[in-house]
Amino acid sequence: MSAQFQAFLGQTRVTVDLDPSSPTSSISLALAHALNLPCIFTESGHQTCSTILAVPTVNGFYRSRLDFVAGYDLPTDVVLGNDWMVPCEPIQLEGCYSLQQPTPHLLDDPASPHRWYPVAGLSPFPSLAPCAHHTP
């Protein structure tokens, strides 16, 4: 499965790819530096960058603070791995992929490092919806 859609890092619109084969999420190193994101080197030598990502779901948008592994040659600005797909599981609707709203249990007690904040109403940015048929 590969699904691309638009989302936000802060106020910046980014292209996101879902990659179930990746255990962690990644961000383009060039984008991280362009956005002046706080980045650190881990003990394993990887560079991680912290930011808030807002993604469209079938019932609106959700934001989560997450540390992304900085990488080169990514297919998009951001690649979401299983650390995002577990709480916000992708589903196929009418031939395209979308992200489900996290369950109430995850909203009450989100797995680290997620902190979910529902955006009021349906999609405030309908042009960012991952499926063309999605309307507010």
Image (cartoon, rainbow, N blue to C red):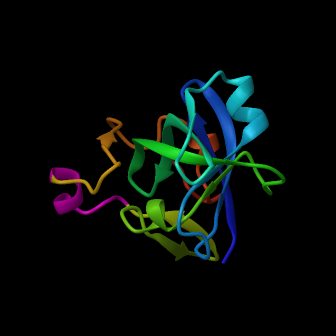
Q: Is residue 35 left or right of residue 83?
A: right
> Was residue 102 drawn as part of the magenta stretch in this picture?
yes
On-image quarter of the N terminus: bottom right
Q: In this picture, is 57 found above or below 54?
A: below
Q: In this picture, is 95 found above or below 104?
A: below
Residue 134, position in %: x, y?
55, 55
The magenta stretch spans which residues?
Answer: 101-108
Q: Nearer the viewer, residue 121 or 79?
A: 79
Residue at 56% across, 34% down: 40
Q: In this picture, is 85 found above or below 125?
A: below
Residue 78, position in %: x, y?
66, 49
Q: Can you name the residue that lies furthest to the right here?
A: 73
Q: Nearer the viewer, residue 41 or 10?
A: 41
Q: Is residue 5 left or right of residue 55?
A: right
Residue at 50% across, 40% down: 53
Q: Is residue 72 left or right of residue 130?
A: right
> Was residue 58 drawn as part of the magenta stretch in this picture?
no
Residue 8, position in %: x, y?
58, 36
Q: Nearer the viewer, residue 104 or 67?
A: 67
Q: Nearer the viewer, residue 74 or 134?
A: 74
Residue at 55% across, 36% down: 125
Residue 33, position in %: x, y?
72, 27
The answer to which image quadrant residue 89 occupies is: bottom left
Residue at 84% across, 53% down: 73
Most frequent secondary structure within the magenta stretch: helix
Q: In this picture, is 85 found above or below 92?
A: above
Number of marks in the image?
Answer: 0
